[in-house]
Image: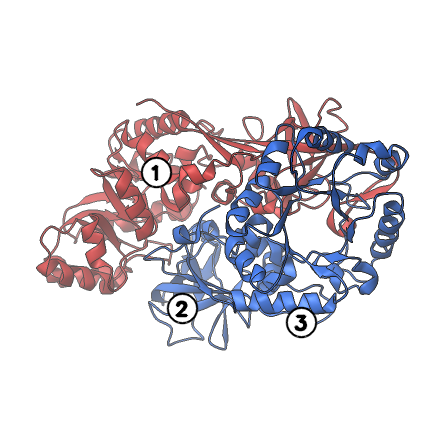
Chain colours: A red, B blue
Amino acid sequence: MPTPDLHNKRHSASVLTIDLGAVQANYRQLASVAANAECAAVVKADGYGLGAVRVGQALASIGCRTFFTAHLDEAIALRAALPDREIYSFNGLMPGEAETFSEFQISPVLNSLGEIEIWARYCADAETPPPAALHLDTGMSRLGLMPVEVQRLATEPERLGGFSISTIMSHLACSDMPGHPLNAQQRDAFSALTIALPRAKLSLAASSGIFLGPAWHFNMVRPGAGLYGLSPNRENPNPLQQVVNLQGKILSVRDVDTPQTVGYGASRRITEPTRVATVAAGYADGYPRSLGNEGSVRIGNVSVPVIGRVSMDLITLDVSNAPHAGPGDMVELIGPLHDADAVATQAGTIGYEILTRLGHRYHRHYIEGTA
Amino acid sequence: MPTPDLHNKRHSASVLTIDLGAVQANYRQLASVAANAECAAVVKADGYGLGAVRVGQALASIGCRTFFTAHLDEAIALRAALPDREIYSFNGLMPGEAETFSEFQISPVLNSLGEIEIWARYCADAETPPPAALHLDTGMSRLGLMPVEVQRLATEPERLGGFSISTIMSHLACSDMPGHPLNAQQRDAFSALTIALPRAKLSLAASSGIFLGPAWHFNMVRPGAGLYGLSPNRENPNPLQQVVNLQGKILSVRDVDTPQTVGYGASRRITEPTRVATVAAGYADGYPRSLGNEGSVRIGNVSVPVIGRVSMDLITLDVSNAPHAGPGDMVELIGPLHDADAVATQAGTIGYEILTRLGHRYHRHYIEGTA
């Protein structure tokens, strides 16, 4: 994971601003919606691309006690910044890793009977292993104990006898579609499966699940996307604050007067006088290639179309409607009037992919939160 | 730019292998196709995602003298590894940067009369500024001097009088389509525009352009994609060696016997007994979300489909046809039987985007080249 210092290039043309105060505000709002549950924070994939350590510190400073990563290495990197918080690693326990989990006091999320057996065997001789979580699969068919495995645990409780279980969790597949029948099915399956298991904190909902209502909150909620400003669903206005602002620098502006094509593949032909601006951001910076001839950016209040293909390092814009734009000016690639969800819709994907692709050639600027 | 050390996570499940010997072999092959021209190397975007410093060192050790990056910061990072090579930065010269170019002996690629003026003014007082390149726009409408600007230089030669010009370049828009008329048009326009300019090395072709034939080679070719094994065009078999091998680790395998959906959005319904494997790679690792229900991976000689959506950290596969696959086994996400170009076709993009998205949670393993 690149450190914040490595992100801060000295001569980067384009600037990615990450508002840690907005992350904190979103955490507080999500926690208040799920007021009867603990509110954890998911900072996997380098904090959805925004910096796990910076986000983790900002949230720990306002009281967040529990953090989730996907990989053990992510958890270890976070441990150095958050020495006294609970940190879980979703992706489970591979053979040979138990001692490392214990050394860094990272709680494994155990996803199968096999992983439970490895952890139990390790804990039999370990001095102070961290507590573990159990992950139950209620409808993702991805990771987690299948119902048949949970039944086995119920009839063979000695499998869970040798270690501490802090949390039992599952994960919703369709929580961004509030009306989807799977939401209630998964909730009910989770409730039913946990009855025969040891008492522990129960956790089902991530960001979108929080907005399904209190019946999905159980003892702990685990927002990720919402912390970073992504919309919980498409049915309601986004109640969360924007965290990301991406400003691309115009490197060049040219008046194209003669019929001419723009960019690779000559995919866009200019037939009337057009002002073309070239901006320092491309698909290697995470600006999706699928935005070629499809995307738009903002210059002040004007929406400006991407013309031609997105290049590796550059995009070209038709700025005929923004005649004052010149070299050195900034355009808004992601911002208040054109957020990550909106960019994602143009690109044919979801805001999560837009954030986790944000590249490492931008100058990264953090707006500090409250301490 | 993350350093190689930062890439090498200790517990990463999945492994990205980069064959520097294959990069060297591709360089030699490209150089031999353009035998009458110098062969430079394009290592922008962190060497197309594969590590600019490692690639740069491997190519310098077999005689490559000239390197191109997109950003000044990329060039500065490369300068530390290659103290005695020529390094150019494509994205031009922004106000205030001239002294830094000179300090690190990075040659700016001058893209406009404005940039030429900045550089000339700086060089008037500078002791040993590096030579510059001029970039002429012959059909990309992106960066580079427009024909009208080149004419101005021809009639006002004093604009170029105060500094050394090593190279005059342009860039082809359609070189991956050998039959496209723009290839000859751009070549002829480039030849015509350079007549009135000072003598310098002329350079037009990148990887695909090299295969258009000697008339496009001029004095220097600048391959990027081909070095990394991407195919020069779709009309002929790829003559280059594969550089990238991406192995994803299976974290879990489950037999799904009851009708059930897989992954987010319940986009895939399993109706007959199916073996589902979950692998540690997702869109945050650069495995495109567009591969959900579209992509495939290899297990030995068997092609295995991606089922359900691609998650941030995970993909799910139907491994019913690979019954021996189990947790801990590796699957080939990118490799000899399923290269980056093939993955790109499934994902609806080009191999360039697949490579430059390769994530930083993989264990990165380099196969050393020859010294």
* Contact? badges 1 and 3 (CB < 8 Å): no
Marks 2 and 3, how far apart at CA: 28 Å
Nearer to us in this view, B138 or B287: B138
**Amino acid type shown at disc 1:** Val
Q: Left of A3 or right of it: where is A251?
A: right
Q: Amino acid at mark 3?
A: Pro
Circle 3 marks a residue in which chain? B
Residue B40 position within the rendered picture, expressed as x and y whole percent measured from the top left: 67, 57
Mark 1: give few (<14), some (14-19) or many (20+) Cα within 10 Å.
many
Residue highlighted by disc 2: B330
The reply to whether the C-beta atoms of the residues labelled 1 and 2 are less than 8 Å apart is no
What element does badge 2 sit on?
strand
Which mark is in front, 1 or 3? 3
For label 2, count other residues whose C-alpha is less than 10 Å away and answer few (under 14), some (14-19) or many (20+).
many
Depth check, mark 1 against mark 2: the one in front is 1
Q: State the image quarter where residue B362 is shown.
A: bottom left
Query: Where, by quadrant of the figure, is residue A144 drawn?
Result: bottom left
Q: In the displayed structure, does residue B133 sit left or right of residue B82?
A: right
Q: Residue at x 44, y 50 (%)?
A: B3
SS for tag 3? loop
Residue A197: give x, y in percent of width and height: 16, 53
Few, some or many residues within 10 Å of mark 3 (<14, 14–19, 20+):
some
- Disc 3 target residue: B239
In the image, are marks 2 and 3 on the same chain?
yes
- The Cα atoms of the two marked residues, 1 and 3, are separated by 44 Å
Q: Chain letter of disc 1?
A: A
The residue at which mark 1 appears reads as A53
